[in-house]
Image (cartoon, coloured by chain):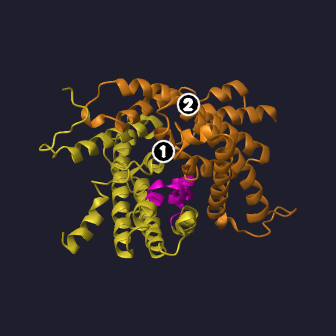
Amino acid sequence: MSENKSKMSILTNGILNENPVLRLVLGTCPTLAVTTMASNGIGMGLAATFVLLCSNIVISALRNIIPNQVRIPCYITVIAGFVSVVQMIVKAYVPDLDKALGVYLPLIVVNCIILGRAEMFASKNGIVDSALDGIGMGIGFTITLTIMGSIREIIGSGTWMAGLGKLIPALGADFAVQVVPKGVDTFSLMTSAPGGFFVFGILMAGATWLTTRPKKSAPAVEGGNA
Amino acid sequence: MAVKLASIFFTMILVDNYVLAKFLGICPFLGVSKKLDSAVGMSLAVTFVMVLATAATWPIQTFLLTPVDAAGELKWDMGYLQTIVFILIIAILVQLLENFLKKFIPALYKSLGVYLPLITTNCTILGVTILNLDNGYDFIESIVCAAGAGIGFLVAMVLFSGVRRRVEQAVTPKCFEGLPITLVAAAVTSLSFMGFGGIVDAIFKV
């Protein structure tokens, strides 16, 4: 495999094949909690991507210095440092997003995607590869959160991307795309807890179907009713 | 006082259940709920660490990070260190618990296995310590809230391990096998918990 192709595959790996949420089942808590609106999903995804990228770079750079026995506390400290940075930035520049994400913003520290990638990837690979992995995983996470937020928001509240104006001030504070006409009763259960689990289950089944479908030449051995 | 504490306790278990209503601690909820006994062991470990962590972090936040003088003014503000300090305290507590279990209850240590170190990254624990402070609870209320959150986690885990045993024997479409159908089952479990909304207010008249 050529060098270029492998770098590209590290980047794209996180988007579908090893999508952190749908395939590796990491970071499920923020996925379920903040996706009541698509714009929250984008904000959370970007915040987590930033932490993931920075912590992957630093941990990869320190991978030969950190003693193996105390690596987890070291990783956690690095991650917590970057999360505090994100917290301060968000509080200062996008206070509305800070309110919408609430306790889930500091909880990025315990997001298993970040610790998981540090342990599985950054501690074994070079800085460039780790940075690419961080970006790829972050994009995969952001896309998944946005899709899930869109489904829940459209079915649950009838709008799409409401609140995006808080992230991009140019759009104006009241920016929202009205998908379901006003006056039509929306299925508000989707924005509460059960809807989250349900949409997550359906999306995960969809991702499983997408990634396992083309392998027709190699039939699955287990689960057959022979 | 007692009524308020009881109200906090039962609200945490039934209405604001961390797993089913607030989406905290989903990883162990999906990972360890396959067997009843490991679900109970994990939940008890989580409850224990939760109460300990609250008991440790509440004084640190109140007296070290953001102390208030007699006039109600902040003496100094190091609130920005909250995330780092709390996660380190929790990591230390988990390490202590692990050593304790390894020495005194090896059977439980074996059955919890890989999930014990993962308590550190269990968002319920960091979540409960931060939410207690956000809600402005005093020390006793925080401890009761943490205990309630832990018991709520236990209730959700035990109920769901029962649901899960039935789901695993069901015939499902190929792509739904495993986790996806489990999540759909969790949706139904969570729906049933929505029925508790308002029950605590009605009982304790707060």
Chain B image colour: orange
The stretch in magenta equals A94-116
Q: Which chain does tag 1 point to?
A: B
Viewport quadrant of the C terminus of chain A: top left
Separation of marks 1 and 2 at Cα, in angstroms: 17 Å
Q: Which chain is yellow?
A: A
Q: Is residue B44 depicted above or below A60 in this figure?
A: above
x%, y% of residue B57? 72, 55
The answer to whether the residue labelled 1 contacts the one labelled 2, judged by CB atoms less than 8 Å apart, is: no
Q: Which residue is under mark 1? A: B27
Residue type at numbered disc 1: Cys
Residue in view at x 53 percent, y 27 percent: B159
Residue type at numbered disc 2: Asp
Q: Which residue is under mark 2? A: B37
x%, y% of residue B154? 59, 34
x%, y% of residue A82? 53, 68
Check residue A29 for magenta coloring: no
Q: Earlier in the sequence, mark 1 or mark 2?
A: 1
Residue A159 visible in this rendered orientation of the protein: yes
Residue in view at x 58 percent, y 63 percent: A73
- Secondary structure mostly taken by the magenta-highlighted segment of the chain: helix
Q: Is residue A75 left or right of residue B106?
A: left
Which element type, helix, strand or loop, lies under badge 2? helix
Give the mark count: 2
Mark 1 is surrounded, within 10 Å at the Cα level, by few (under 14), some (14 to 19) or many (20 or more) other residues, namely many
